[in-house]
Image (cartoon, grey):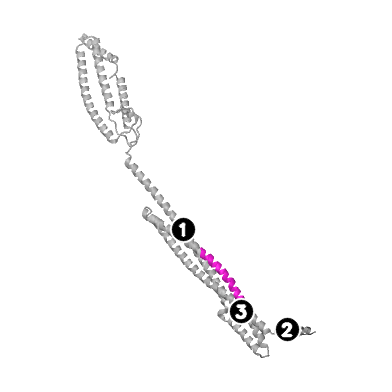
């Protein structure tokens, strides 16, 4: 019985102690507000650290934007200089190679700046996203702590009992609330959010600068290609001009091809009818020599013709003075005279044809020798025809009739006398 009573009393005591502790709300309120304050403090610290990292990322973005702008200006300036060089002097190989190498270096540097700036944008966006999340979490926890502080203050202010425990707990609660209701502590999360918004604006500005720098680099590359094309064109034109001048210097002036001629073979064995080319100097020399020979030949022929004519007149006079001479003899003399005269004239004509100088090639491409030979040939035929018609030159049989008539007339006169 005794042990049972002891256990019964112990159970009653324990129940009373537990009920007393449960009925004390001050201990629970202090614990709640303390835990909440610690969590808000932790979130604020994380948001603050993220905000600082975001600020560094913004500074890196600003520096990258300045580098991109500088590279853009340099690329645009150098592209303009290359265009001016193309217009001014595209034949200066040394300066062109220097400009080309410098332009390629600027293009490489600009593209490197663009690539690094893209990495900066990527990192800034990653840090900004984390900062936004932590900032909003810190703001939410701070607002929750502020609401709890307001509730606790209102609750303990309405109690009428004034006890030492109550006052002590109330002071602790107010201290915690005042700590997290200060302006700087309360705006830690909001500051992180604001910094993340600034990072968004900076990344957009950097992206625009990168696009401009990339376009400037591409434009500079196109300008370098234009420079290379201009250099290639200039070298081609230079080679063509040099080859043309070399051909003009080395190639002699070629006379135009002559057509077929009727003249005699050339003294050097080349036929004039073959249309072979000769130098202007040789043609002029040959023409002068042939001209001199032609003049001398004509003088000699004129003297011979005069002698032959005098001989013919003497023979005719002798024949007229000796009528007793048989007709056969007079006919023989007339035939000899006619044959000599014909041979003399034929030789003179052939010599004139042979000694006709070979004129130099005409600038119009017409063979003057051919024309002259044709004219001489036609004149010869015309003279032969006319002489045959009027009986001045022909076969000896045609001359017998006038001689016989002359002899008969002389004999008739003698007989009458």
Residue 5 percent coordinates (x, y):
78, 85
**Dot placed on the residue nearer the N-terminal end, 3 or 1:** 3
- SS label for mark 2: helix
Can residue 131 be found in the magenta stretch? yes
Q: Is residue 357 above or below residue 171?
A: above
The structure residue drawn at horizontal position 44% and vertical position 56%, both measured from the top left corner, is: 223
The structure residue drawn at horizontal position 38% and vertical position 49%, both measured from the top left corner, is: 235
Q: Is residue 109 above or below residue 13?
A: above
Q: Residues within 10 Å of mark 3 (few under 14, many from 20)?
A: many
Image position of 406 (left or right of 42): left
**Dot placed on the residue nearer the N-terminal end, 2 or 3:** 2
Can residue 202 be found in the magenta stretch? no
Callout in the foreground (3, 1): 3
Which residue is more in the foreground, 3 or 157? 3
Which residue is more in the foreground, 225 or 160? 160
Q: Which quadrant, please, contains the C terminus?
A: top left
Callout in the foreground (1, 2): 2
Reading the image, the residue beneath label 3 is 37
Image position of 200 (left or right of 226): right
Reading the image, the residue beneath label 2 is 14
- SS label for mark 3: helix
Rendered image quadrant of residue 14: bottom right
Q: Is residue 92 visible?
A: no
* Residue extent of the magenta highlight: 118-140
Q: Which quadrant, please, contains the N terminus?
A: bottom right
Q: Is residue 109 visible?
A: yes
Reading the image, the residue beneath label 1 is 219
Are the residues at dot 3 and dot 1 in contact (C-beta closer than 8 Å)? no
Q: Is residue 280 above or below residue 215?
A: above
Rendered image quadrant of residue 386: top left
Spatial CA span between label 1 and label 2 = 89 Å
- SS label for mark 1: helix
């Amino acid at each position: 019985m005794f042990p049972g009573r002891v256990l019964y009393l112990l159970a009653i005591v324990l129940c009373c102690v537990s009920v007393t502790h449960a009925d004390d709300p001050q201990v629970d309120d202090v614990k709640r507000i303390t835990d909440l304050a610690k969590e808000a403090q932790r979130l604020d610290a994380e948001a603050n650290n993220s905000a600082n990292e975001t600020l560094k990322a913004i500074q890196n973005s600003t520096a990258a934007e300045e580098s991109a702008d500088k590279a853009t200006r340099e690329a645009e300036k150098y592209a303009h200089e290359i265009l001016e060089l193309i217009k001014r002097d595209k034949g200066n190989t040394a300066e062109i190679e220097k400009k080309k190498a410098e332009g390629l270096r600027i293009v490489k540097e600009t593209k490197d700046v663009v690539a690094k700036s893209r990495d900066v944008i990527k990192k800034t966006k990653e840090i900004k996203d984390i900062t936004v999340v932590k900032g909003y979490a810190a703001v939410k926890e701070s607002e929750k702590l502020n609401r709890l502080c307001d509730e606790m203050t209102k609750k303990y202010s309405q109690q009428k009992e004034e006890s030492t425990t109550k006052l002590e707990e109330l002071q602790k609660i107010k201290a915690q609330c005042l700590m997290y209701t200060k302006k700087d502590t309360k705006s830690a999360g909001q500051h992180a959010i604001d910094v993340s918004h600034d990072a968004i604006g900076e990344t957009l500005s950097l992206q625009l600068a990168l696009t401009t720098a990339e376009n400037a680099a591409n434009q500079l590359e196109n300008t370098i290609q234009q420079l290379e094309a201009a250099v290639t064109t200039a070298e081609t034109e230079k080679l063509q001009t040099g080859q043309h001048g070399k051909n003009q210097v080395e190639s002699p002036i070629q006379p135009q091809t002559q057509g077929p001629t009727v003249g005699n073979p050339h003294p050097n064995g080349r036929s004039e009818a073959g249309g072979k080319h000769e130098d202007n100097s040789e043609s002029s020399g040959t023409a002068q020599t042939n001209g001199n020979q032609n003049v001398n030949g004509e003088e000699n022929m004129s003297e011979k013709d005069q002698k032959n004519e005098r001989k013919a007149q003497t023979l005719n006079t002798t024949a007229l003075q000796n009528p007793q001479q048989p007709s056969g003899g007079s006919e023989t003399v007339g035939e000899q005279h006619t044959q000599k005269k014909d041979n003399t004239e034929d030789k003179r004509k052939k010599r004139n044809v042979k000694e006709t100088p070979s004129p130099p090639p005409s600038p119009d491409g017409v063979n003057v020798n051919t024309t002259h030979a044709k004219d001489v040939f036609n004149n010869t035929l015309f003279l032969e025809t006319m002489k045959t018609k009027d009986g001045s030159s022909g076969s000896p049989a045609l001359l017998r009739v006038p001689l016989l008539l002359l002899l008969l007339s002389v004999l008739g006169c003698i007989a009458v006398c």
